[in-house]
Image (cartoon, grey):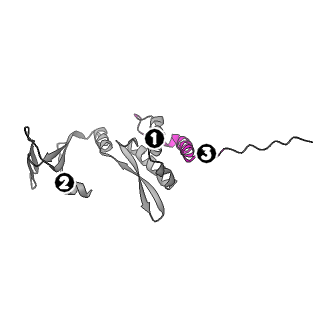
Amino acid sequence: MTDTVEPQVPAKLSPMEAMRGTLTRLESEFATALPPQIPVQKFIRTALTAVQMNPDLLDADRRSLLGACMKAAQDGLLIDGREAALVIFKTKNGPQVQYMPMIGGLLKKLRNSGELASISANVAYANDEFRYELGDEERIVHSPLLRGERGDPIAAYAIAKTKDGAVYREVMTIDQIDQV
């Protein structure tokens, strides 16, 4: 009688373990895409954390998930919910993942561009003095109420100044913000 050895059947990987392996195998591609100040291991850790925090990402199209991670790497943003996020969209081809930069990530990209001299964003309230003038010489005048109830928010705005002297202003009413 001869002893037969059963072949070892590899244990089936969980979807999370499979994703960890895939991201690790793509490490060199992420390293090429990332700016030098972001270690590739940190980027992969934040991507894995994003998936752990939203396991539905594992049920979405894997190619779109990996593509979204690569786009975040190319933009030099971490998928941490502050700089960027992975968002699932339902399509006729099933759930697809898209990378979406967050305000923190957009500000980081602006600061890192070297083109920005300053940027600020504020909220105007009903009892503040707030004027927004369009025309040849656009301007925003906002004097916050320093004493008493400021009231409900009525608008939000941002002002960016570039190093070449250009000024960019964006104002959104609360109705516009709610629509977004």
Relative to residue 161, is residue 58 depicted above or below? Answer: below
On-image quarter of the C terminus: bottom left
> Mark on residue 49?
1
Q: Nearer the viewer, residue 86 or 72?
A: 86
- When asked about the image quadrant of residue 128, the answer is top left
Q: Circle 2 — which element?
A: helix
Q: Circle 1 — which element?
A: helix
C-alpha distance separating marks 2 and 3: 48 Å
Residue under circle 3? 13
Q: Nearer the viewer, residue 156 or 117?
A: 156
Please report the bounds of the magenta region as a residue range: 11-38
Residue under circle 2? 174
> Along the polypeptide, which appears first: circle 1 or circle 3?
3
Expressed as whole percent of the image width and height from the top left, the position of residue 62 reads: 51, 53
* Pointer 2 local density, CA inside 10 Å: few below 14, some 14–19, many at least 20: some
C-alpha distance separating marks 2 and 1: 33 Å
Could you tell me which residue is drawn at 48 percent across and 39 percent down?
44
Whether pointer 2 and pointer 3 mark residues with C-beta atoms closer than 8 Å, the reply is: no
Expressed as whole percent of the image width and height from the top left, the position of residue 150 reads: 11, 44
* Pointer 3 local density, CA inside 10 Å: few below 14, some 14–19, many at least 20: few
Is 92 positioned to the left or the right of 15 in the image? left
Kind of residue at disc 1: Thr
C-alpha distance separating marks 1 and 3: 18 Å
Residue found at the very far right of the displayed protein? 1
On-image quarter of the N terminus: top right
Q: Does residue 23 show up magenta in the picture?
A: yes
Q: Does residue 7 show up magenta in the picture?
A: no
Kind of residue at disc 2: Ile
Whether pointer 2 and pointer 1 mark residues with C-beta atoms closer than 8 Å, the reply is: no
Could you tell me which residue is drawn at 56 percent across and 48 percent down?
15
* Pointer 1 local density, CA inside 10 Å: few below 14, some 14–19, many at least 20: some
